[in-house]
Amino acid sequence: MRKRGTLLLAILLGVAPLAVQGAAPGTPQESVRIPFRIVLVQRASGGALQIREVLAFVPVLGSPQGKTVLLPLPPGAREVSGLRGLRPTGWTEGAVIYQIPEGPGPVETVLEYEVPYRWRKATLLYSVPYPTGSFDLFAPSTLNVESPQLRRGSPRAIRGERIQRFTAEQLDPGLKVTISLSGLPLPTGGLAVRGGILLMALAVAVALAAPWLRSKERGT
Amino acid sequence: MAELGEAALRLGFFVALYAAVAAFVGAHRRGNPDGERLLASSRNGVIVLAGLLTLALSLLAWAFFAHDFSIAYVARNNSRSTPPLYTLTGLWGGQAGSLLFWTWLLALYSALFALRRSGKDPLATYPAVGILMGIAVFFLFLLNTVEDPFARLPNPPQDGRGLNPLLEDPGMLLHPPLLYLGYVGFAVPYAMGIAALLTRRVDRHWVQTVRPWAMSAWLALGAGMVAGGWWAYRTLGWGGYWGWDPVENSALMPWLVGTAYLHSAMVQERRGTLAAWNMALLILTFTLAILGTFLTRTGVVLSVHSFAQSAVGPYFLGFLAVVLLGSIGLYLWRLEDLRSQGELESLASRECAFLLNNVLFLGTASAVLLGTLFPVLTEALQGSRVSVGAPYFVQVVAPMGLLLILLMGLGHVLAWRRTPLPELVVKLRWPVSLGLGTSIALAVLLRRPLVVLGLGVVSFALGSVLQEYHGAATRRSRTTGELYLQALWRATLRGRRRYGGYLVHAAFLVMVVGIIGSHAYVTEWQVTLAPGEALQIGRYPLTYRGIVQAQTATARGSAAVLEVQGGKGFWLRPTRMFYPSFQQSVSRPAVHSSWREDLYVVLENVSPDGKATFRIWINPLVRWIWLGGLIFLLGVGVAVWPEARPTEEGWERAVMPASEEAMGS
């Protein structure tokens, strides 16, 4: 119930302008555990997937408190914002940095980011940094989703929209979760840029080939 | 947009590579239709490259003005509060942008060169185009790999860091572009030289075609150094304009060698000698320009220009090695072709004076190079860095400079081939009198032997310049009946190259007067004053009125208000500003400038009770340096401006000295 409530809350949340980003060594994996991690693929626009994550950290009993932990995001993640709960303290290349507060119990966090894609496909690669109780992916039913590590769960309906669910339990640190998405809309802005690049390349090719084209013209 | 810019750079790399290969292969197959088409295609490639890089630079500029902080380079060198002027200068304020700017200038130079020269002398032009495109390939490789100006941040900040506070000065609008124009400009004469070696066409004609390109590069580099001195003087707040910083030296060295080349090339044009020497100078000039770029960008030696450091060092070193070894190898291979067609006939000849001046220019450049690289050499040999500092440079360069000025004065009165002694005596009469007269007068007034000697030599050289102008005007006035000033003007226009050159010499002499004055008679104070406290600084009664808060778009801090009474009276407001995004405090001097001296005040510190510590300099004659810079621009402009009828005959007349005209030789 708690997870479902958090999920709904996360979907309804607004965006807070807190910027994070990052990469650096992590804390010992034993110091923290992630009871749940929920990844929501919200929409695809402008050549990027908008993703919201809801997860919790639980300090492992007996480990030193007040530790720094790193949460790696899929490669290419950008525009990272902390929305609710525990705020990121910084970022390194590809990972968000959190400072786990002292005291017992889980600490929740909600963050949002986008991952760019090309053409109509995207691949999301999630590294599991700490023992993770469950990993859930929610994506609009219009998308084709494939993942060797996740199994299809029962679909949900949220605000009238059908959402498909993929899930896995008890993930060990070091595991990689690969998610392939297809059927994404063609990025319109990207298309224009690509068209521009193509035109530019064509103009260059014509300019370089002009002496041959001209002589051919003269020949005919 | 960043994607489009990146694509333009990627495409540019392949276009440059193609244009280089097509130029060489086409030149090799010249004569058959495919060879001709390859050459035409290569020329198109050069023009296309200029277009692509113009597009890339425009897109980067657009990103700056749109504050697109998703581009890492924009985020590092721009902020929303950066004023529009410095938004523009941010384009070349960092490593990647300045490399793009460098490459863009190279592409423009190459396109201009290909368009101007390809129809006139394709055999020599295309190999040179190939060399230029080879250089462009190297820079485009850097831009596509280690220094991508369009590299994006995965998580763009809301605001950028802004431009380095030291670069927030109008001088930055002129100084770097001019220096880059100079550095890049020397690539064209170098490429022409290598092409001449490859095609075995190292005759007088070749030297003539190189001249305008070498002159324009030399002008830009010289003007860039003066603009740099002006920027340093107004911004850095250490009271001076030239600190013998490694990066300053890096610009000075190719300029010195380039100056030597411009003189010795005249000897080759006139007398057919020194071909091997000239080729060596061209290679050395470009090599030093690349070395300068390497030093500027790698931080291999400590410099005030550390804002442009990055990891391009090994690549530049590799490129430098290729340029140097390749050029030397080709040079040695073709040494036989460079054999002189004439020889020096007399010591009392202009060519001999030029040769001596070349030795001095090269000696000065070597001394500067040694001093610049001394920390690196001592670290390699002893394990610890030892810097030589300004006194070394002054002690080495000043005597050589004086000798050069002496030779300059002599050079004006010496004729080509030989000068008969009686004529030499006659022509030296007035300049020597002026030099001696000045020395005697100054000896009474100043009692500083070295200053007296320096200004005496300067007067001698200036006398010889004035004598040349006077001689030309008088001769013309006598034969045409024109008024003196009209005759002077017309004579200058008819011999632009010669009299423009003299104007450059005069500019240099004016600058030397300023340099001598500001070095020999500089006075410095460090004082702490309470509000309302007064003191006498030289001839200026100065009162500290207090501190006011100062704020700009990117900084906040304090401005001290100083009132200078007496005469017309004026106010000075030196500031000390803190730039939060750089966590850096910068003191901006307040300067009151006159033809006699500059009162230069720097606010060093402000204590809570309102007391302020100042460093104050009186720098005599500094304004003469900037005046010399302006005359230098005018002189080179006159010298490179094309003659009305650029015939071979007209050119011969233009370079022929008055003494020869008089002798009828």
Image (tube, coloured by chain):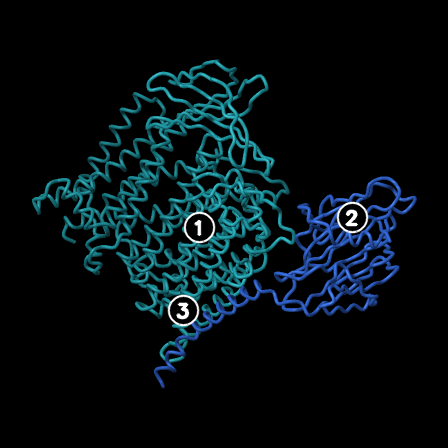
Chain colours: A blue, B cyan
Q: Would you say A162 lies left or right of B538 here? A: right
Residue farthest to the right?
A: A62
Q: Are marks 3 and 1 in contact (CB under 8 Å)?
A: no
Q: Quadrant of residue A211?
A: bottom left
Label for residue A109?
2
Q: Tag 1, which chain?
A: B
Label for residue B180?
1
Q: Tag 2, which chain?
A: A
Q: Quadrant of the C terminus of chain B?
A: bottom left
- Label 2 to label 1: alpha-carbon separation: 51 Å
The front one of B181 and A86 is A86
- Label 2 to label 3: alpha-carbon separation: 58 Å
- Label 3 to label 1: alpha-carbon separation: 24 Å
Q: Is residue B450 visible?
A: no
Within 10 angstroms of label 2, few (less than 14), some, or many (20 or more) residues? many
Residue drawn where x is 52% and y is 31% of the image: B551
Under mark 1, the amino acid is Tyr
Within 10 angstroms of label 3, few (less than 14), some, or many (20 or more) residues? many
Q: Nearer the viewer, mark 2 or mark 1?
A: 2
Same chain shared by disc 2 and disc 3: no
Q: Is residue A123 visible?
A: yes
Residue drawn where x is 60% and y is 55% of the image: B152
